[in-house]
Image (cartoon, rainbow, N blue to C red):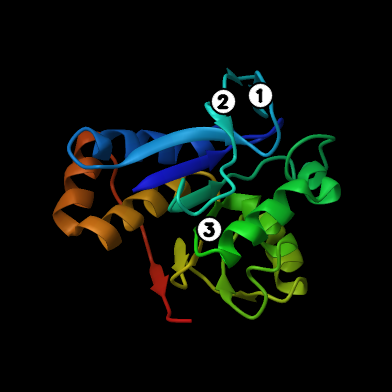
């Protein structure tokens, strides 16, 4: 499984690094590879809390290169000049997400990254969740907001605020590789999984 975790200036650190940690541990035993990608060519990306990361490349545009795209949140509720709002305004990332999804790639979000999925038209009419500070805006975008830690509608997944990204990644491992794999990784990183996980079929 090839996982592309999206980076942009102002992303929330744990939204991206939490899933990266989970998939990294899984990759030590399974054919799981996770990388950090930007919507456009960048040498460095700075997180909301000042973490500077060097991305692995530009977001893949072909389903042959990626199975799952994970989109972090950051900056939406604070009205920051960078982060999710800036990405929604530019339109580049939502367009890329819409293209990838249309071509069969599963797209997931953590925290207010759901607003980027909404901008891409991926949550309209679907059950979804986001950080509690963006719930009303996600609902106004046409999503069916539900109370959950993780919402899985098959080809679109959303997770609640920040640390829920770890549970999202563990849920993906369980879905793709079984509960034993997810439990082993959770124990390795000393994480107690939380729920509920709402699963629906689209």
Picture layout, residue 8 above or below residue 73: above
Q: CA distance from mark 3 to mark 1?
A: 21 Å
Looking at the rendered structure, the secondary structure element under dot 3 is strand
Q: Quadrant of residue 58?
A: top right
Residue 128 image offset from top left, x and y in percent = 57, 69
Residue 159 visible in image: no
Is label 2 in a helix, a strand or a loop? loop
- Residues 197 and 115: in front is 115
Is residue 168 or residue 6 the one in the foreground?
6
C-alpha separation, residue under disc 2 versus residue under disc 3 = 19 Å
Residue under pointer 3: 107
Label 2 or label 1, whichever lies nearer to me, is 2
Image coordinates for residue 1, horizontal then vertical, percent: 33, 48
The residue wearing badge 2 is 55
Can see residue 201?
yes
Q: Nearer the viewer, residue 110 or 96?
A: 96
Q: Which residue is mark 1?
A: 45
Dot 2 and dot 1 residues touching (CB under 8 Å): yes
- Tag 3 and tag 1, C-beta contact below 8 Å: no
Residue at point 59%, 77% (across, down): 126
Along the viewing direction, whichever of 133 and 128 lies nearer the viewer: 128
Which residue shows up at 71% across the image and 34% down it? Answer: 40
Which residue is drawn at the image coordinates 56% and 25% (left, top)?
55
Horizontal placement of 180 versus 24: left or right?
left
Q: CA distance from mark 2 to mark 1?
A: 7 Å
Q: Farthest left residue?
A: 180
Label 3: few (<14), some (14–19) or many (≥20) C-alpha neighbours in 10 Å: many
**Label 1: few (<14), some or many (≥20) within 10 Å?**
some
């Amino acid at each position: 499984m090839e996982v592309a975790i999206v980076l942009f200036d102002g992303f929330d650190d744990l939204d991206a690094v939490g899933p990266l940690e989970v998939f990294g541990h899984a990759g030590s035993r399974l054919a799981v590879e996770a990388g950090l990608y930007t919507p456009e060519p960048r040498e460095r990306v700075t997180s909301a809390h000042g973490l500077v990361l060097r991305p692995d490349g530009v977001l893949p545009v072909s389903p042959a290169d990626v199975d799952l795209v994970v989109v972090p949140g950051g900056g939406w509720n604070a009205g920051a000049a960078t982060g999710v709002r800036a990405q929604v305004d530019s339109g580049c990332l939502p367009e890329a997400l819409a293209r990838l999804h249309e071509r069969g790639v599963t797209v997931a979000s953590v925290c207010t990254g759901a607003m980027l999925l909404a901008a891409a038209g991926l949550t309209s009419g679907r059950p979804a969740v986001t950080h509690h500070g963006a719930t009303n805006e996600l609902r106004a975008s046409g999503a069916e907001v539900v109370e959950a830690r993780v919402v899985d509608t098959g080809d679109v997944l959303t997770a609640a605020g920040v640390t829920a990204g770890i549970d999202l990644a563990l849920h993906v491992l369980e879905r793709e590789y079984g509960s034993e794999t997810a439990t082993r990784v959770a124990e390795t990183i000393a994480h107690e999984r939380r729920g509920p996980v709402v699963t629906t079929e689209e």
